[in-house]
Image: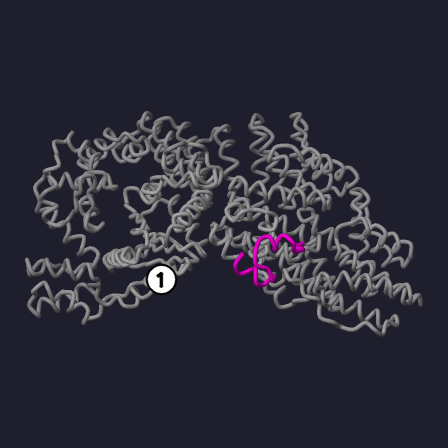
Amino acid sequence: MLYGRSTELAALDELTAGAREGRSGALVLRGEAGIGKTALLDRTAQSASASGMRVLRVTGVEPEADLAFGGLVQLLWPVQDRLDGLPEPQADALRAVLGATRPPTRDRFLTGLAVLTLLADLAEQGPLLCLVDDAQWLDQATSDALLFAARRLAAEQVAMVFATRDEGFAAPGLTELRPSRLDTGDAVSLLADLGLPPALRDQVIAESAGNPLALIEFGAARRDDPGSFTPVTVADRVLSSYRTQIAALPEKTRLALLFAAAEGRGDLPLQMKAARTLGVGLEDLEDAERAGLIQVTESTVVFRHPLIGTAAYQGAVLARRIAVHQALADAADDPDCRARHLPLATTSPDDEVASELVAAAERAADRSAYAAASLLHQQAARLTPDRRAQVRRLTDAATCALNAGHAGQARDLAEQAERSSPEPEDLARLAPVRAAVMFESGERREAARLLLRTHAAGPGLGPAILRTGATYGWFADDADSVREAAERLASLGEADPMVEGMAHLVDDDYARGLPLLERAVAAGQDGSDAARTRALHSAILLGDDAAAMELAAAEVARCRAQGLIGALPQALHLLAERQVLAGAHRDAEASVAEAVEIARDTGLRERVAWLGGVPARIAAIEGDERRCRDLVRDVPDVGRVAGESALSLLELARGDYEAALGRLETAAGPGPQRHMAMAMATVADQVEAAVRLGQSGRAERPMRAFEAWARAGRQPWALAVAHRCRALVDGREEDYREAVRLHGQGRRPFERARTALLYGEWLRRARRRSEARDTLRSALEDFEGLRAVPWAERARAELRAAGDATTSAKATAENVLDRLTPQELQVVRLAADGNSSREIAAQLFLSRRTVEHHLYKAYPKLGVGSRRELARLNLV
């Protein structure tokens, strides 16, 4: 019987009922020790089992908090036979977790996707309940995987419940429920069976502060010893009560309990194998079992409450704890289990032990458990007698911490390593991780300079560090760093066309810089992943929309195929920017929506804010001022030019030319090269605003730079915009005509429409009204296709002024795709291309059932009833 838990039980029942009906969900039970979280999980498991739900359960144990995937192994061990049904990269990731194979896992979030798919597959046979107790003691790799799965649950018939203490296990995005303390009435009911006199009962209620475990333990203790309490906190009193009970046991029983507490996983055979070396046998557990402190089966030992294990461990002297950990390490067959006990059994430097810990760290890193790998490297460093080797291990620890997403910890470890060694070689190995932390913290110029200094001190470091330094320098507006990196690469015989090209661009030498970027694009088309990444960024700097779109789409496809979930948001961001330029606004919104969802699920908070620049641009084009301003408000400094560009476009469309021009002049600043693609794209806005104000001189310098860039890059859309800008300033029709011709070869419909609008205005003022009407109708058609409402209104006004009396405002024809959510759009397109639900799920990092749920919702919106009908629709 659970007293005072009607609210909590109702929430849990609603969660499991939803799973049975096809609505997945997750809930976090958060509260102090003894508040009743485990009892609620027990009750939920019992109720779910009775209703036919399958139950998987895992309990975090404190000794395993730093053991890579220790919790996930416990959870998935009973269902490992289902791994063969997963997509191969996901199956490999979980096989590595379970120790069946050890292939490197390239993305730390791939395991979470595999868990999601596995849980969804299990739920195909019936609803599934996944219970996680003492989640605050899960290792981070397990926490990351389970939380990724929990956040992406939708229609899989899966319910997940995490029970955790107040501290630890941050789970943003999941619903939390805090079990309340028991009121006096419920406390009285709970104590009814203990037979306490009223005076003692009232004291127990007062001292327990409504904590159910405290009520039970204090009541039993007060009944047996009325003078046993001292005025300490509830948690300390409970712990003290357990220590008292353990202290009353025989010495060998206390030692057997210490083995159970130190081992932590409940592995009875391992505990007994180790315990025999200290003269302890299975019979020595009997007194503890009779006292109700533990439950023993033929293969496991489980403490009735985790605080009992804590009391057993903390109550032992240090020498005894060291002996027990050494015995457990010697008895362990699993090298990772041995590595967990060795540092706790070693009090002085020991290179042999340190080497074992390094090997364990490398195994953890191969499985993408970088947090565990970092800790193992730190432990190895502590036990390493040689100072230089110690610094190397601290450096490896810092690198793993950075890969785990712990930039602050990585900085601390790098600084600790730096203080330990002045040797140039050691500092050189530290530099990449220190620079990465600095760059992520906003110290971009300092990061670039550090890498260049490091390479100067140790020229054998290779070209990669110089390429990174050049990239950091570019985004920091640090022209000197970009030039220096290019010169160093050339001196090494490793000249990189992208870096060399950027070095010319920072000097405004487009004629030499852009052809080099063209070489980088060509070289990267069929090269390595790194070469293709350089090719993509080179294509963006060139304004080569066709190559950039192709390369961005290929990068997204690569991330999907290889399960590179952590890299996917950035790839989708770059793709979305290209889609906006191509006028594919709904596609761009779908890309951004997926990127935002994944970034949130993987803890990439800054990326979520940065992504707002893309929909802000769409909102500006479409004239949605409120949405545009709301999105720009959250864009971080690194995306400032994109945000200012969106706002200036909004102001330009409204005719607020002074505000638009002033904003763009401020955003450009002294060094726009890090945003060259965006800065060059906004020059036309500067020119138009300046001309409208009768101050074309304010835009002369950026216009000349743009013309030089366009001539050097030879991209049709850029040459067209350059001619349009010159036509605005000089008023020559031949420039307008050439701009219109070049737009026929380009890929930017919004720019094409703006050129047609301005040329139509010029023709009308020249009293060539018939020609003006033809040109303006072309502009209006493009604007309406883009839903660019304010620009379409301008085109209509010009048409009316040109004598087109039939032109009137009209609702834009509805596109059936607009009825779909971004995720539904992605799903139906992939389904129409013939992909199965499972294939779509693997590409979008969803479950098969969620994919089918999206299809089920999309069919009636599109007026179809099957995939066959879907394939006949125009979904472009």
Q: Percent position (x, y) of residue 869?
A: 61, 55
* Residue matched to label 1: 17
Residue sitting nearer the eye, 826 or 441: 826
Does 472 sit left or right of 260 as displayed?
right
Residue at image position (40%, 40%) is 83
Is the residue marked by circle 1 packed among few (<14), some (14-19), or many (20+) residues within 10 Å?
some
Secondary structure of residue under mark 1: helix
- Residue 671 visible in the displayed image: no
Residue range corresponding to the magenta coloring: 855-876
Tell me: 474 left or right of 398.
right
Task: Return the x and y of residue 111 as percentages of the image width and height.
Answer: 43, 43
Note whether 215 is above or below 670 in the view shown: below
Q: Is residue 792 left or right of residue 91?
A: right
Question: In the displayed structure, would residue 772 be above or below residue 156?
Answer: below
Which quarter of the image is occupied by the C terminus? bottom right
Q: Quadrant of residue 756?
A: bottom right
| Location of residue 272 with respect to 12 vertically, above or below | above
- Magenta span includes 875: yes
Magenta stretch: includes residue 448: no
| Rendered image quadrant of residue 698 | bottom right
Q: How is the image coloured?
A: one colour
As drawn, is 209 to the left or to the right of 245?
A: right
